Image: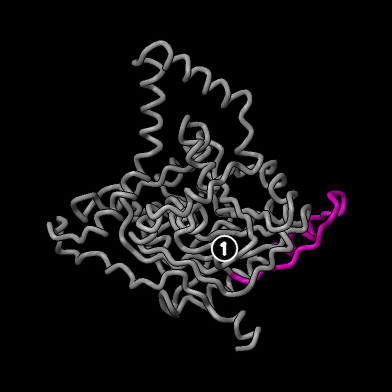
């Protein structure tokens, strides 16, 4: 096989058979004879969901309901977080042994999540991966880029990538340590520039639609992507000479059902107002439960197929030469490349009628 043909080949990272689809709609409760591996998969999702709340509970318990030295420890910990902690903005402390645990194989197997490579990414440069769509919680992004269960390090050797999340996630004691171990960092401009200015191969993964896009995450053949006026990532790419890589996950929007909230509706206006106050959106959603399939906070078992597209070379430009026209030029190239990636593979995971719609940030 020639090198060109090899580059066009799509690499599937999971050779195991896909998890059977969700039970039929007439089944409410999980049967007793569920295979052990599926129970392990569900357990990983339950623990993942409860972990931040458990960390918050530990914090409150140590502060107010434990002995004096536990209280002292928590005061010191929180003081360190507020005054001295820097790792969310300085590349973090990713632990590959933790990302390779079999636990994460069960996590991605629940859906299952697959990572597909469509071309080579040379490790002699940095990249900004744009992940789409956000979905309710970007579970496909977490499974692919915060663990090695789908083979990121094998498919893209030499690429040292960090998955960027809202800084509010790092404000929970103990949970911040978990996030840094899986390779997550703060999604601030400072953090982006720090990582990209390191040696070649250091890269970032941004969920570009942000939490506002979660409000448009409905199972549908039409993907509403909040990208038309999201251009800050292009400016960061130009300042660091980092190539842009579009990434699309088919199935991300199918993991939860969301209450109807069309733009302009009363519910959407309330949600946008709360998002403006708190910094993150509050979609009204439901999935399935632990022992029943009708309602709950666990995601629906639905395959997620993530495709990493071809990189868009970006020149390194000094800040005074980065103009709006230049940003618009590469922003349009990125949107075109994302749409081409989507159109190329959508027939494998949907139908010819599915489409991407680029929208602005919704206003209150």
Does the image show residue 107?
A: yes
For the view shown, which residue lies furthest in the left direction? 32
| Closest to the observer, 255 or 220 | 255
Q: Where is residue 313 in the image (x, y as percent from the top left)?
A: 74, 67
Horizontal side of residue 160 vs 221, given as left or right: right
- Residue 328 among magenta residues: yes
Magenta stretch, residue numbers = 309-331
Where residue 143 sits, quadrant-wise, is: bottom left
| Closest to the observer, 219 or 160 | 160
For the view shown, which residue lies furthest in the bottom direction? 1
Where residue 119 sits, quadrant-wise, is: bottom right
The residue labelled by disc 1 is 358
- Please tell me whether residue 118 is drawn above or below residue 157 in the rendered image: below
- Please tell me whether residue 72 is drawn above or below residue 35 in the rendered image: above
Horizontal side of residue 38 vs 165, given as left or right: left
Horizontal side of residue 359 vs 215, given as left or right: right
Does the image show residue 216?
A: no
Residue at screen point 33% across, 54% down: 299
Q: Position of residue 79 (x, y in %)?
A: 56, 20
Residue at screen point 37% across, 34% down: 53
> What is the secondary structure assignment of the residue under circle 1?
strand
Q: Quadrant of the N terminus?
A: bottom right
- Residue 256 among magenta residues: no
């Amino acid at each position: 096989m020639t090198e060109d043909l090899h580059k066009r080949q799509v690499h599937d990272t999971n050779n195991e058979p896909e998890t059977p689809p969700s039970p039929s709609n007439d089944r409410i409760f999980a049967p007793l004879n569920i295979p052990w591996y599926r129970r392990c998969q569900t357990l990983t999702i339950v623990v993942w969901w409860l972990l931040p709340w458990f960390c918050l509970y530990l914090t409150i318990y140590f502060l107010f309901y434990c002995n004096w030295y536990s209280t002292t420890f928590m005061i010191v910990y929180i003081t360190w977080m507020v005054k001295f902690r820097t790792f969310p903005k300085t590349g973090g402390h990713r632990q590959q042994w933790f990302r390779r645990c079999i636990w994460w194989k069960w996590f991605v197997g629940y859906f299952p999540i697959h990572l597909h490579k469509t071309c080579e990414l040379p490790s002699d440069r940095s990249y900004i991966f744009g992940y789409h769509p956000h979905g309710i919680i970007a579970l496909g992004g977490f499974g692919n880029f915060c663990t090695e269960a789908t083979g990121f390090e094998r498919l893209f050797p030499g690429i040292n990538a960090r998955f960027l999340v809202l800084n509010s996630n790092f404000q929970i004691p103990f949970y911040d340590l978990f996030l840094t171990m899986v390779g997550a960092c703060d999604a601030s401009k400072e953090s982006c520039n720090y990582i990209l200015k390191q040696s070649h191969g250091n890269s970032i993964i941004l969920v570009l639609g942000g939490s506002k896009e979660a409000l448009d995450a409905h199972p549908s053949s039409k993907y509403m992507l909040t990208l038309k006026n999201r251009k800050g990532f292009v400016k960061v790419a130009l300042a660091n000479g980092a190539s842009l890589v579009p990434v699309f996950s088919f199935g991300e929007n199918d993991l939860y059902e969301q209450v109807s909230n069309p733009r302009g509706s009363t519910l959407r206006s309330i949600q946008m107002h709360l998002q403006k106050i708190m910094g993150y959106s509050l979609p009204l959603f439901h999935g399935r439960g632990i022992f029943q399939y009708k309602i709950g906070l666990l995601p629906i078992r639905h395959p997620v197929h993530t495709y990493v597209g071809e990189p868009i070379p970006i020149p390194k430009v000094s800040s005074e030469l980065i103009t709006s026209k230049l940003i618009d030029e590469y922003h349009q190239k990125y949107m075109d490349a994302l749409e081409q990636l989507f159109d190329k593979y959508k027939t494998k995971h949907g139908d010819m009628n599915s489409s991407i719609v680029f929208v602005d940030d919704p206003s209150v």
